[in-house]
Image (cartoon, grey):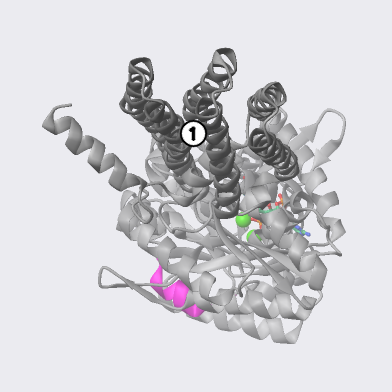
Amino acid sequence: MGKQHINTAWARIQDLREGADPLTDQARGALVRSLYERRTALAMGAICGAMASTVVAFLSDNSLLYSLAFLLSSIAILRIVNARHLARNPDDIDADYLELTYKFGAFSYALVLGLVAAATVALDTGAMAQVLMITNAVGYGIGICAHNAARPTIALGQLTLVSVPVVWAVLAEGSVAGAFLALTIALLFPAMFSIVFSIFGTLRDSLDAADRSAELAAQMETIALTDPVTGLANRSGLDRDLPGVLERAADSGNAAVLWIDLDRFKEVNELKGHQAGDQVLREIGSRLSALVEDGGIVARFAGDEFVVTTRIDSRNAASMLASQILGEVRRPMRIDGERIEMGASIGIALMPEDGCTAEELMRHADLALYEAKIAGRSQVRFFTTDMTRDLAHRREIETELRLALSRDELSVYFQPIVDLETGRVRCFEALVRWFHPEKGEIRPDEFIPVAEDSGAIVTLGNWLTGEAARVAAQWPEDVHVAVNLSPLQLKAPGAALGILNALREAGLPPERLELEVTENLFLEDSPSIALFIKELSRAGVRFALDDFGTGYSSLAYINQWPFSKIKVDRSFVSGAQAGRKSDAIIRAVSQMGHTLGMEIVAEGLETVEQVKAVRSAGCTLGQGYHFSRAIPDYKAALLLAEETDSAKGELRKRRVG
Ligand code: C2E
Ligand code: CA
Ligand code: CA
């Protein structure tokens, strides 16, 4: 053996010493357990040795050999019984104990077998008996080395214990053949040493590789279940953990699933950049996590949606948690030195009343969120069974609405807005009409909100603006057309350009288009809305504030934005609350409009008395069934033609009393 060989051999022996075992506990456990595998081969080996020694004892009729044979057989039986017992549940038994038991049995068996072989030589029992025992002992030593290579100490220990007595006995016998036999057996050592370590190395490497790939798989799993931006569970993580959380919560009472959707997140992302958006998400994520007790989950479900699930005592407690969440979301944050305020809508489903499975609770929380979003910003809704019904109805409308445009089921009707002084038609408001082949007419109040939710309003609105402009281009130059705009429509990319293009195609000057918007448009302080209004105003398009008096009725909006008209909602004119008080309000608004150079339109005029009342209160324009309902384009054209013809003004007088 060269010097280097001796060095590596020494290093290996060092490895064998206790405390220097380079294996992980898990790998060592697996290797120790492998000792107990192949139990039949082990039993066969033990039985062979025991039988051979018994035969030799019987042939020589020697009491020492009888005793040794008895001892060897006993050890063999004990080992077989013990291996069977331990094999029933080896994973539950400590690896140290398994190794120690094995070592004890293996070493004692090897030593006694070696002693039997040595005794046959020393007692001169006859050539064949000696051959039988020596081949048995040496064969066992070699075989067991291969079998137990997973634990080199045991393997080489057994080889040593079985061989040393034999070597000693054959040397003591003093013959040349005996000396050569001893040498042959001694030479087995380096050979077996190398084989054992080579097998051990291969086993250890494959265990290491298995460990590493298990670790890698665990890492991959964590990545797949985690949202990289917030570090919270992602949708898949939620899917995996939610059932467990609900199960644990069920043991102690109730649970709540809160589905949170951030308001205005898209804007932050678009205007301040994705990095700022990510920071907002991280901040919200950590604020939510701080609110949820241990054992709950906070997950980022998608984009700007979070789901919180936690054990909860009552509906009240869920409601309190929702308020806390709203409070935390709204608390201003500084992102890149800029102050950002967010809002959120929340839908809540409770276990057990709204469902017990993760799937059911998520579906119901989603429905509740949908309702919360419809109700406006920063709303919280608990799931109710009505929501399922409403949803089915809305879905039906949504699907049919998509087809309605292509099937030509939609048309634009026009309702005149009349000058209360002269009775002349000054403008027509374009109103969409849907005539469904089976269901008859479907009211805009029913399908416009659905179109707004589904985003179909953008297509519908573009189509309607184009149609209205095309029709209006045929009217006398001083007659305007008014079109209703939903907030979503004007936030769509390229909205302003789309409207200007529609006007150009129809050949309608921008000054003849009025866009009716409601106050809720200004609830969100959105730069895209400001930009839209500025761009179109500059081009000459006019704006009207619709349904005034139904919302916040803040005079600030009137001052801030370039409205040319304010449309006082019909509830002030013909509604239940119409009366002296609303009369006073109309008067005040009219006065203000007058000062600011705006016209005031009274909506919903149905009787001549109402016309007189709003006129004396200062309204300059009126709209309502008293003048006309919304009519198709050809009727509007007829009305205008009639007006030009009746120079005597009879018709006008009848209209305005
Ligand atoms: P709006 O903008 O306030 O439109 C006026 C509504 O009042 C119309 O209902 C009109 O038919 C109705 N009306 C007019 N005069 C009277 C009256 O004397 N008495 C009564 N009781 N009602 C009167 P319509 O057409 O059903 O539209 C309802 C709402 O749907 C509209 O309210 C508007 O917000 C929306 N809408 C209608 N067409 C469109 C559209 O093309 N685009 C958008 N975005 N919204 C639309
Ligand atoms: Ca309107
Ligand atoms: Ca209105």
Q: What residue type is labelled 1?
A: Val
Q: In which quarter of the image is ligand 3?
A: bottom right
Binning the other alpha carbons within 10 Å of mark 1 as few (below 14), some (14 to 19) or many (20 upward) gives many
The quarter in which the C terminus is drawn is bottom right
Tell me the residue at 67%/45% (across/down): 90
Front one among 85 and 612? 85
Q: In this view, does 279 lie above or below 114?
A: below
Which residue is at the far top? Answer: 128
Give the x, y percent position of residue 339. Answer: 33, 74
Give the x, y percent position of residue 368. Answer: 73, 60
> What kind of secondary structure does the magenta stretch mostly adopt?
helix
| Image-based side of 178 in relation to 434, left or right | left
Give the x, y percent position of residue 546. Answer: 58, 62
- Residue 47 appears in the figure: yes
- Identify the residue position indicated by label 1 in the image: 162
- The residues colored magenta run 552-561
Element on which disc 1 rests: helix
- Residue 601 appears in the figure: no
Q: Does the magenta stretch include residue 113?
A: no
Tell me the residue at 41%/56% (across/down): 267
